[in-house]
Amino acid sequence: MKENSSLKVALVGNTNVGKSVFFGRLTDTYTDVSNYPGTTVEVSRGEAEIDGRTVELIDTPGVNSLIPVSEDERITRDLLFLEKPDLVIQVADAKNLQRSLMLTAQLAEANLPTIVALNMADEADRKGIELDEKKLAKQLGTPVVSTVAPTGEGFEELEGLVFSAEVPRLEVDYGEPVTGSLKDISSSLKDLNLPEKASGLMILSGDDSLMKLLKERLKPDQLDELIGCREELREKSAEPVSFQVTRKRKKIVQGIAQEVKSESGEGRILSETLSRLTMRPLTGLPIFLIVLYGVYQFVGVLGAQVIVDFLEVEVFQKVINPAVRAFTVSVIDVAFLEDMLVGPYGLITMGLAWALALVLPVVLTFFLAFSILEDSGYIPRLSVMVDRLFRKIGLNGKAVLPMVLGLGCDTMATVTTRTLETKKERRIATLLLALGVPCSAQLGVILGLFAYASQLGLLIWGGVVALQLVLVGWLSSKLFSGRSSEFIMEIPPIRLPRPVNVARKTYTRVKWFLKEVLPFFLVGTFVVFLADKTGVLGFMIRGLKPLVSGLLDLPGDAAVAFILGFVRRDYGTAGLFEMARQARLSPLQITVSSVVITLFVPCIANYLMIIKERGIRTALAIVGFIIPYSISVGALLNFILRSLEVM
């Protein structure tokens, strides 16, 4: 361990073990979030003050193995092998020690000094799980400490152990013929400046991503020797080498886990019963509907009616708008500027009012509700409940993660489709995200919009959008060639949301909204203002009016909302929201327009990300399909609802 120079410390761990909370608690001077070179995977870096010394801290993407099956796992492996951190803090799940130790074994083989932080110790305690830290530290030969990241419990002890970390003594005997093959390729690996045993096992296990890296560093004859040894080992082995390696590791870590772990079983019955109920379709669906109703009341009634009405009427209509109008008339006295600020498409009356008075209250209440659900552990259980359905549309359960993240932001969710293993899955997931997964801001406004319709309309909207996702996904699974991969997901425990966590997440998301979204609203409003002044907007409205007024039976100027939806989905939906508040949309029209704008083109930010991830041809094909499809679905829904006279 370095004594005088600065240290580079990497946080490593399985998914859903609390690494990000760890990172946030340890860093206190700056945080830099950027894409790892050559990828769109984000890696957070910051500085931490530990024992009076400043160290560089890196929060790596979650991994289940250092042999990568996704872009995230490859980035973590490359970061550990190429950047060579001086220390790894492995954030382990105290409730699932065996799974964590499988990763510890690989860190040991990579010759990385490691501290094992048994995180979520409070949750393990509630489940009646006790771990003997001292015995585990003795078994591993490196420091072990129990932590609770949200409260900071154990962090003082952790920081005091940083400079005494060692490479774990978790040695696995892989037996013959694997050990012999490792010796055969050792000479080719010696001068690569890579961990010899770890990289050797990866090569023999069939890690093609590492072979690509080695092509840049090895002579052709050395590369041929490695490939020859790997093929020879495959011929000798009765089962895949990766299976042999995993089985040997599992046997060792099972023994260690059994020796240091004891379970009383107390505190598990209620949480596990509730957990099972949320994941079984028969009970999970009613629970989901109850949760949805609660979110609707909180967002649609409190956010979209009480708070919006106060801000719109008492703040903007009675105070801000008259003040700005009086200022422009008495001081500036320029009709063009007055119209630009407080006209029908004014920066104040439309851009700022929509962003702060209409959308922000709805988004704030939705972010708060979403953070509570997220912190409770409910969202992963919802993902498990719909996993079987996802398999019918050419995806596996891993695709649930991008879909759930799409409820936060479709643009970033499109990036996370990289975690899906096959091209087919990535294409289907990207299409479904663009088609019918509303981002959190749009979803919040839609929930608020139905406060002016009916709960039946909300159910129809949700049912129609879900049906289109299933139908288009099923058709895509038949049309797109390729295969689906296996699904493994770590399910966190059901727990009471921590107010501090909920407040932090809500604050971060609202801050993002104000920083990233507010400029879009103002720029979009200005573009609409110019389009109105130049006649372009009227031309576009006249072009869309036959579709909007004819097929969809909506007011002609609802076309503006669909046009604005390309700038930002929630911006367009805010236009429908304002029309509903003015009683210019009937409950039936609210239902039809909400379906269409949910299925309509992705926002421009998401569209650019689709081009980056899938290519311009795929992006054009997606939009070319979505526009006529969404209008056709809306027209059919309008015809059915009017024929049945249900609204």
Image (cartoon, grey):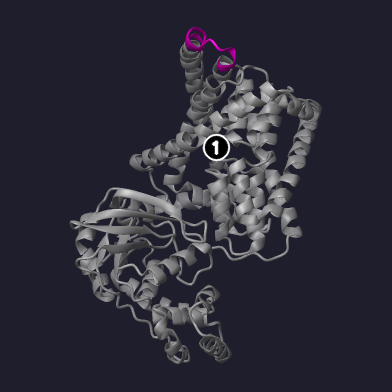
Can you name the residue that lies furthest to the top here? 330
What residue is shown at x 21% (from left), y 64% (from top)?
161
Q: Is residue 328 magenta?
A: yes
The relative height of residue 637 versus residue 169 in the rendered view (above or below) is: above
**How far from the left and from the top, in percent, is residue 183?**
43, 91
- SS for callout 1: helix
Packing grade of label 1 (10 A; few <14, some 14-19, many >=20) is some
**How far from the left and from the top, in percent, is residue 524?**
59, 31
Residue designated by label 1: 292
Secondary structure mostly taken by the magenta-highlighted segment of the chain: helix
What residue is shown at x 25% (from left), y 75% (from top)?
141
**How far from the left and from the top, in percent, is residue 60?**
41, 60
Location of the N terminus by quadrant is bottom left
Q: Is residue 594 magenta?
A: no
Describe residue 548's horizontal placement relative to residue 508 as left or right. right
The relative height of residue 470 versus residue 592 in the rendered view (above or below) is: below
Describe residue 127's horizontal placement relative to residue 523 as left or right. left
Residue type for callout 1: Leu
- Any part of residue 496 in sight: yes
The relative height of residue 68 versus residue 499 in the rendered view (above or below) is: below
The relative height of residue 281 versus residue 237 in the rendered view (above or below) is: above
What residue is shown at x 56% (from left), y 28% (from top)?
448
Total labels drawn: 1
**How far from the left and from the top, in percent, is residue 203?**
50, 80
Foreground pick, 226 / 140: 226
Snapshot quadrant of residue 142: bottom left
Location of the C terminus by quadrant is top right
Foreground pick, 451 / 427: 427
What are the residue bounds of the magenta stretch? 325-337
Foreground pick, 345 / 158: 345
Describe residue 408's horizontal placement relative to residue 196 as left or right. right
